[in-house]
Amino acid sequence: MPARLLDGVSLAASTLETVSAEAVDFAASTGRKPCLATVLVGDDPSSHVYVRMKVNRSRKVGIDSRRIDLPESTTTGELLSVLHDLSSDPAVDAILLQHPVPAHIDERAAFEAIDPRKDVDGVTRTSFAQMAFGEPGFSSATPGGIMRLLDADNVQLAGASAVVIGRSPILGKPVGMLLLAADATVTLCHSKTTDLADEVRRADVVIAAVGRPEFIRGDWIKPGAVVIDAGYNEGNIGDVEFSAAAERAGLITPVPGGVGPMTIAVLLDQTVQAAKALADVR
Ligand SMILES: Nc1nc(=O)c2c([nH]1)NC[C@@H]1CN(c3ccc(C(=O)N[C@@H](CCC(=O)O)C(=O)O)cc3)C=[N+]21
């Protein structure tokens, strides 16, 4: 396997050490811990697993969580009301609405009900525009994690051809904006793309964000390319055909142990930053 591995576990661990120290400082100066509210609608088992991981990791680094689980039958209006209440609750610093919500709910309206100052998962229009314009603000968690992984290995993005496969509101679209802000030449591919293999063959940096196990074939990868697998599928299978891709890539993220741990690290880092900004603590 010629490719080197991009290790998300160790980068997440070092990120979380800093986050934990900052959470301790915050508690010392305010008398309370930063607080992340998680909102989950419906009973998708893997969504429950992800939320539990976020809550457990929060506790480990000294962040309180408030977990709100709502039934599948929740209406858009009811969800908006929960999110408005959390947005105005001074005891809550940060809000995560787990994606996807059931199809009958207007997810965009729900994301917009989050106060941008508490949008630590980077899902509001405000955060999206900040990512697009390269302004400071909260990144979407997985895209932010991907950018930190690339940065930690000094991957050159300026002028690189970056191909993103997938255009979801929490992953493909925002990571496209972050890559553009970093001066990559960005191609966003999706279900209507006519020749995906051909797009991927040109890519110096491949971001797989489809949600289909091993959808990206190893022999599409340009020799030496950087391959980021942001797929989370049943049984921890990535979106990339890993062993074949690793034969050709220069750098590749494993699944598990790549993007996933960094997603949570960014979420909790941004939670502490939100708490500090709201409390005006430096
Ligand atoms: N609003 C919103 N924001 C999200 O960030 C979000 C979401 N909705 N919906 C679902 C996806 C999924 N997601 C993961 C986070 C961590 C791992 C993770 O840490 N995975 C471990 C494996 C964990 C295991 O062992 O099962 C790894 O890749 O090493 C995976 C998936 C965040 N998501």
Image (cartoon, grey):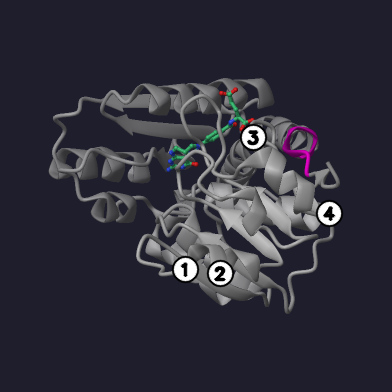
Query: Could you tell me residue 207's position as x and y percent?
Result: 60, 56
Give the secondary structure at mark 1: loop
Give yes or no for residue 53 being in the magenta stretch: no
Q: Residue at x 69, y 44 (%)?
A: 244
- Distance from disc 4 to disc 1, alpha carbons, whole Å, reads 30 Å
Kind of residue at badge 4? Asp
Label 2: few (<14), some (14–19) or many (≥20) C-alpha neighbours in 10 Å: many
Q: What residue does disc 2 label?
A: 199
Kind of residue at badge 1? Asp
Sequence order check, earlier mark of 2 and 3: 2
- Distance from disc 1 to disc 3, alpha carbons, whole Å, reads 26 Å
- Distance from disc 2 to disc 1, alpha carbons, whole Å, reads 7 Å
Q: What residue does disc 4 label?
A: 153
Kind of residue at badge 3? Val
Determine which quarter of the picture holds residue 238: top right
Dominant secondary structure (helix, strand or loop) of the stretch shown in magenta: helix
Which of label 1 and label 3 is nearer to you? 1
Q: Residue at x 69, y 53 (%)?
A: 227
Mark number, residue 195: 1
- Nearer the observer, 112 or 241: 241
Kind of residue at badge 2? Glu
Give the secondary structure at mark 4: loop
159 w.r.t. 96: above or below = below
- Range covered by the magenta-colored residues: 6-11
- Distance from disc 4 to disc 2, alpha carbons, whole Å, reads 24 Å
